[in-house]
Amino acid sequence: MIYTVTFNPSLDYIVSVEDFRLGLTNRTDSEKMLPGGKGINVSTVLKNLGIRSMALGFTAGFTGAEIERMLRDMDVWTDFIHIEEGISRINVKLKSIDGTEINGSGPDIGREKTGQLMQKLEALDEGDVLVLAGSIPSTMPNDIYMQIMKHLAGKKVTVVVDATKDLLVNVLKYHPFLIKPNNHELGEIFNVALDTRESVVPYAKKLQEMGARNVLVSMAGEGAVLVAENGTVYESPAPKGTLVNGVGAGDSMVAGFLAGWLENQSYRQAFYMGLAAGSASAFSENLATKEEVRRVYDQVVNG
């Protein structure tokens, strides 16, 4: 079974404004509301690809209830822990200005609630996959992902981490199966600018030296790079297509990689499935369907 953990789920309010102007009243041309958070996105794309997973994490208030309702309607399995105070965050994504977002903070998660999550994770065992993805509330320690991996040490759980800065670096000594920074996040760790696929490779290898088994680096329009545990480096430009919505593309890449890997333990297939899933979501109004991923996969593999 695959489990995803989203500490800070959200309602993503995605809007398009034709001619956005600061300081004035702007009216939307289009709008939609979706459940968000990196782990939730991974679970959603896995479900679209025909692979079941259990979405774990924390929800609070009326927004948390709506996140869970939407996921039930989408037939995504969930087992969230409820926080009595505060509300799950609302993130505003301004689609017409690429990359512009206003993200909420989310509720405080106390030690008792974190302990409840650890108890749920006790059920994981060899053969299970755990995806730790996304940000955490500012009140939580930045080694929480490391604490989870330490707690599971010896269980032979396959762990995937998609996080930034210390939240990512702290887990490396516990040898996660896969980490997925983007090129900017990778550069931030080493205080360098990484703009080409070639420049990414040596720094991905440095993360391997620090403990990561496989390093998958997403690079938006530049494509992606995988430095695999077996020493092989895979790299590819981005598939051809029109960017429609970049929200969730990186999470889709994680889901696609896992789907490809679980099928036959081929790094090549996992890499191209990840690239295809991430790109298919970027080319779509919503997170990619199985048919959309397959179309892009055929393009990147067969030319």
Image (cartoon, helix red, strand yellow):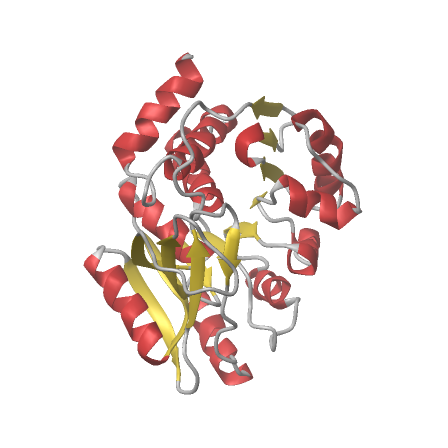
298 or 240: which is nearer to us? 240
19 or 137: which is nearer to us? 19
**Left-right relation of 197 to 55:** right
The image quadrant where one finds the C terminus is: top left
Q: Residue at x 34, y 73 (%)?
A: 64
User: Residue 96, image x and y in percent?
Assistant: 43, 47
Q: Is residue 6 above or below residue 246?
A: below
User: Residue 270, image x and y in percent?
Assistant: 46, 31
User: Residue 223, image x and y in percent?
Assistant: 55, 29
Locate residue 116: give its quadrant. bottom left
Q: Residue at x 51, y 28 (%)?
A: 267
Q: Is residue 122 above or below residue 302?
A: below
Hey, which residue is sitting farthest top in the picture?
303
21 or 37: which is nearer to us? 21
Hey, which residue is sitting farthest left in the picture?
73
Hey, which residue is sitting farthest right in the picture?
191
User: Residue 276, image x and y in percent?
Assistant: 42, 30
**Left-right relation of 190 to 219:** right
Can see residue 125? no
Hey, which residue is sitting farthest bottom in the picture?
85
Q: Residue at x 68, y 52 (%)?
A: 172
